[in-house]
Image (spheres, helix red, strand yellow):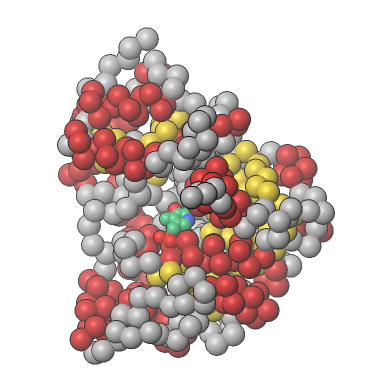
Amino acid sequence: MRLEGPWLRAAEGAMLLGPDGVPAPTVFAEMSALAAATGAINLGQGFPDEDGPREVLEAAVQAIRDGANQYPPGRGIPDLRAAIAEHQARWYGLDVDPDREVLVTAGATEALAATLLALVEPGDEVITFEPFYDAYGALVRLAGGTHVTVPLTAPDFLPDETTLRAAFSDRTRVVLVNTPHNPTGRVLPPEVLRTVVELAEQYDAVVVTDEVYEHLTFATPHVPIATLPGARDRTVTISSAGKTFSTTGWKIGWLTAPLALVDAITTVKQFLTFVNGSPFQPAVAAGLRLPTEVFTGIAATLAAKHELLADGLRRAGFDVMRPDGGYFVIADAAPLGFADAREFCLALPGRVGVVGVPVSAFVRPDHQSGYRSLVRFAFCKQRPVLEDAAARLAALTPTA
Ligand SMILES: *Cc1c(COP(=O)(O)O)cnc(C)c1O
C-alpha cells in the first residue's frame, strides 16, 4: 500500500522530517516522554497545571446538566457569538456583528486550519515570522502553499523592516501574525503591525492573526491588528479560550472577520469538525463576560510566575530574555557552556530533573543559526513547581 501523501508535506512543514525522510515525533512528545520516564518537572509543553476561573468550570458542568449535549449551531451558539462580539467591543472598541462576522471553532488550531485551507491555493505564499508555532508550517504545506518566513532574532526578537518588506510579493496570499508571540514572548510593536497592514494592502493579502495570548501580557496592552487603519476589511482575527481560562483541553476557539471571509472559512470548517464542545460554549461565553479584574488578575499571576522562573534561570547562569506576555521564557544556555540546546535539553532531565524545549524546534533546519543555544521554558505552572524547578536548575554548574 502506498503511504505517501500530503501528510508528508505537513510533517516537513512542521520540521518533523528526519534526514531519512521519515517523520519523527514532535520535540514536545519526545521531551514529555523523557519527563515521564525520569520524573523530571515538565516545563516543555505549554499547558497550565491548575484550573482557571471557577465560574467558567461551573458553567460547563451546569450546561451538561441543562442538556447542552447535542450538536450546537454550525457557527457556534448565539450566546457565545454575542459574548465574543461584546468582548471585542469592550476590550478593543471593535464593532463585530455576532451573527455575520463570528465563527466558533475547535480551538484556535481549527480556525487556523480552516482559514488556510479556505484561502491558500498551490503556489500561493504565506508569510509568518520565525521561530513559528509548528502548526503554521504544517498547515501552509497541507494547503499546498509555500511558507515564507521573516526572522525574529535574539536578543530582542524584532523583525528587520527591510527583510519584512522583501518577504512580500505578488504571490503573497496570507500574512499570518502571532502576537503575543510563541515561543519568544514578544508583543510585536505597533510600527511592525502597521508595516504588515501596509504591505498586505499593497499586495492584496489577507492578514490572519493568532491572538491566543491576548489577555496574558505583562506590561504592554494587547493591540489587535484589526484595530489598525485599513486592517479590519482584510483581517481574520483568531483567538481561543484555552490559554486565557486555563482550559486548553476544551478546544473552544473563534475567529472574527468580514462576512465574505467568515462564509468562505465556514465552508471548510463545516467539513473538518462541523461543530464541537456544546457544553463548553456557554461556559466560555460566561468567561468572556467576567469582570476586567479577573482578566488582569490572570495576567498578574502569570507575570509573577514568570519572575519566579526567570530569577531561577538567571541565578543558574542562563542569559534570560524578558517576554512581554504568554506562557514562555527563552533562556540562552551558551553562558553555561552549551552551544546546542537540543543536546542540552536531552541531558537536562537526567542532570537536574527539569525539561525544556530547544527553540530550534520552531526554526527551519536551514535557519538555525542564532537560535542553536536557546531553550524555551513554560512558566504556566503552580508556584511550588516553579520554585522546585528554579532550585533544581541552580544545581547546574558551567561545564566550559
Ligand atoms: C496554544 C496555541 C494555539 C492553539 O490553540 P488551541 O485553542 O488549543 O487550538 C495556537 N497558536 C499558538 C501560538 C498557541 O500557543
- Relative to the observer, which residue lies in front, 354 or 325? 354
Residue 366 location (% of width, % of height): 61, 30
- Relative to the observer, which residue lies in front, 318 or 41? 41
Residue furthest out toward the top? 400
Compared to residue 36, the image places residue 84 above or below, namely below
State which quadrant residue 55 falls in: bottom left
User: How many numbered circles does the render carry?
Assistant: 0
Q: Is residue 286 visible?
A: no
State which quadrant residue 213 falls in: bottom left
| Quarter placement of the C terminus | top left
Residue 177 location (% of width, % of height): 60, 54
In the picture, measured across the screen, residue 392 lies left or right of residue 4, that is left
Residue 17 location (% of width, % of height): 51, 38
Compared to residue 278, the image places residue 327 above or below, namely above
State which quadrant residue 96 falls in: bottom right
Q: Residue at x 68, y 45 (%)?
A: 148
Compared to residue 249, the image places residue 266 above or below, namely below
Residue furthest out toward the front? 1
In the picture, measured across the screen, residue 248 lies left or right of residue 219, that is left
Image quadrant of ligand 1 equals: bottom left
Q: Residue at x 40, y 70 (%)?
A: 252
Q: Residue at x 20, y 86 (%)?
A: 65
Residue 109 location (% of width, % of height): 47, 61
Q: Residue at x 70, y 72 (%)?
A: 233
Q: Is residue 275 visible?
A: yes
